[in-house]
Image (tube, grey):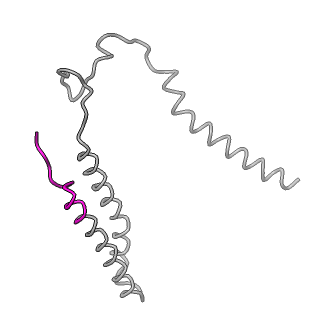
Amino acid sequence: MDWFSQYGFLGALLLSGIVLGAIPVVLPLIISPRARGRKTRETYECGMDTIGSAWVRFDIAYYLFALIFVAFEVDVLYILPIAVIYDSGTYVWRDFIELTIFVGILFLAIIYAWSKGVLHWRSR
């Protein structure tokens, strides 16, 4: 009967996870207002009404620039902990070499993006 209590606990955790995950999805459907008018269906951004169609195709350079930005922001998650404990260990040279290789790979990524013209902002 010991396996039953362990699986019962696992089932209770699974059920509570499903319920807590479903609440943010179902609750707005229940309590949100139902009024839909002409003004509600219009595109609205930054306090101004749009002029023309709101469906505009964006250049791929915007997305590539954003992906490069996100990649370098995530890299801070690796560099910051090493910088904090850099001087407090016996592996100072190993940490320095690993960090140098990591920053070198990032530098190569910047050079590659630059050579492909991703960082060149084209105005229309």
Q: Residue 8 at what x, y percent from top left?
A: 78, 47
Point 74% across, 49% down: residue = 9
Q: Position of residue 69 (x, y in %)?
A: 27, 55
Residue at 30 percent across and 61 percent down: it is 72
- Count of residue discs: 0
Residue 10 vs residue 119: left or right? right
In the depicted view, which residue is nearer to us: 21 or 49? 49
Q: Is residue 23 above or below residue 37?
A: below
Q: Nearer the viewer, residue 53 or 47?
A: 53
Question: In the picture, residue 41 is in which quadrant?
Answer: top left
Residue 82 in the figure: left or right of residue 117: right
Q: Residue furthest left?
A: 124
Residue 49 position in % (x across, y down): 19, 21
Decide whether residue 121 is among the magenta residues.
yes
Q: Is residue 3 magenta?
A: no
Image height check: is 4 above or below 109?
Answer: above
Overall secondary structure of the magenta section:
loop
The image quarter containing residue 111 is: bottom left
The quarter holding residue 95 reads: bottom left
Please report the bounds of the magenta region as a residue range.
Answer: 111-124
Residue in view at x 25 percent, y 69 percent:
107
**Among all residues in the image, which is located at the extreme right?**
1
Q: Is residue 18 above or below residue 56?
A: below
In-image side of 90 versus 60 (left or right) = right
Residue situated furthest front in the rendering = 116
Measured as percent of width and height from the top left, residue 14 is found at 67, 44
